[in-house]
Image: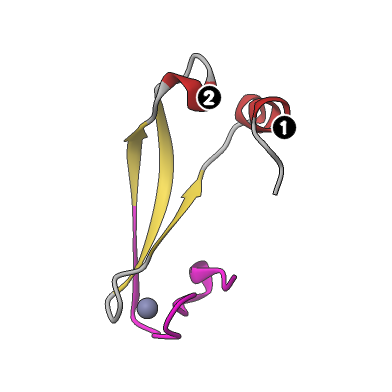
Amino acid sequence: MTDMRNGVCAVCGGEEIYTASTRLETPTALFGMLHTEKVDLYACVSCGFLQTFLDRTDDQARWMRNSWKRV
Ligand SMILES: [Zn+2]
């Protein structure tokens, strides 16, 4: 998949991409004890596709490796 941080939409190829950072409330099961995560959002104006990047910590990376299913 295209990394929209490079300014190109992963779905439609549009080049008008905007970004914002926010904190996302997540279910406890997602990262154990943590409840809000900082994420960077990249949105395509043309088609509305939204790509989300987690500003992950070492603890979160460890949690994903131990608890999530690898694709
Ligand atoms: Zn698009």
**View quadrant of ligand 1:** bottom left
Q: Secondary structure at mark 2?
A: helix
| Residue drawn at x 40%, y 25% as measured from the top left | 27
* Residue 43 image-quadrant placement: bottom left
Q: Which residues are drawn in magenta?
A: 1-20
Residue nearer the viewer, 17 or 29 = 29
Disc 2 residue crowd, few under 14, some 14–19, many 20+, Cα 10 Å: some
Provide residue 32's location: percent of width, then percent of height.
53, 17
Which residue is the site of mark 1?
65
Q: Main secondary structure of the magenta part?
A: loop
Image quadrant in which the N terminus is located: bottom right
Q: Is residue 25 above or below residue 50?
A: above
- Residue 31's label in the rendered image is 2
| Residue drawn at x 40%, y 85% as measured from the top left | 15
| Residue drawn at x 45%, y 77% as measured from the top left | 11
* Residue 9 image-quadrant placement: bottom left
Q: Amino acid at mark 2?
A: Phe
Mark 2 and mark 1: Cα distance apart in space: 11 Å
Provide residue 12's location: percent of width, then percent of height.
42, 83
10 drawn magenta: yes
Provide residue 55's location: percent of width, then percent of height.
52, 42
Counting residues from the start of the chain, the first of labels 2 and 1 encountered is 2
Q: Secondary structure at mark 1?
A: helix
Q: Is residue 59 above or below residue 21?
A: above
Q: Amino acid at mark 1?
A: Arg
Disc 1 residue crowd, few under 14, some 14–19, many 20+, Cα 10 Å: few
